[in-house]
Amino acid sequence: QVQLVESGGGLVQAGGSLRLSCAASGRTFSGYNIGWFRQAPGKEREFVAAISRNSGSTAYYADSVKGRFTISKENAKNTVWLEMNSLKPEDTAVYYCAVTTTIGLSPRKNDYRYWGQGTQVTVSS
């Protein structure tokens, strides 16, 4: 069992930045691939980014955030971050982190087993 808690969301103007955190407890997640997803009102939950297990040497991004968002992790702190720059109003959503046991990085939400409660990000124009 892994418990995930996201934080760092808030209200920011377009062009601004936020850094989201995902802290894990219950079991170390260094052996899991970790993903970030987001869900805007009335829309499906969509993939944002994922980082590989152990050293986190591999990252994978949705095209919509590539070049603007960066996912990173620190195993000693059981924490994964999502650095978000050049934010746009269309980035407004609840952001979730999640854990998957798949071998490779997956953009499919059904591959993720444990989820946090989410943190709201609102980008004003």
Image (cartoon, rainbow, N blue to C red):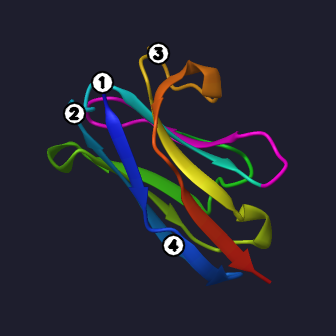
Q: Is residue 51 magenta?
A: yes
Which residues fall within the magenta stretch?
Answer: 41-59
Q: Nearer the viewer, mark 2 or mark 4?
A: 2
User: Is residue 42 found left or right of 55 in the rendered image?
Assistant: right
Disc 2 or 1, which lies upstream in sequence?
Answer: 1
Circle 3: residue type:
Thr
Give the residue number, with chain letter if any, for mark 3: 102
Tell me which residue sits at (46%, 51%) in the image: 71
Q: Residues within 10 Å of mark 2 (few under 14, many from 20)?
A: few
What kind of element bears circle 4? strand
Give the residue number, with chain letter if any, for mark 4: 18
What kind of element bears circle 2? loop
Q: Is residue 59 visible?
A: no
64 w.r.t. 111: above or below: below
71 w.r.t. 18: above or below: above
Tell me which residue sits at (82%, 46%) in the image: 43
Give the residue number, with chain letter if any, for mark 1: 1
User: Is residue 44 found left or right of 82 in the rendered image?
Assistant: right
Circle 4: residue type:
Leu
What kind of element bears circle 1? loop
Determine whether label 2 and label 4 are within 8 Å by CB: no
Determine whether label 2 and label 3 are within 8 Å by CB: no
Give the residue number, with chain letter if any, for mark 2: 26
Disc 3 or 1, which lies upstream in sequence?
Answer: 1
Disc 4 or 3, which lies upstream in sequence?
Answer: 4
Please provide percent x and percent y for residue 10. Answer: 55, 75
On the image, which quarter does residue 34 sit in?
top left
Tell me which residue sits at (44%, 14%) in the image: 103
Tell me which residue sits at (30%, 24%) in the image: 1
Disc 2 or 3, which lies upstream in sequence?
Answer: 2
Q: Is residue 13 magenta?
A: no
Circle 2: residue type:
Gly
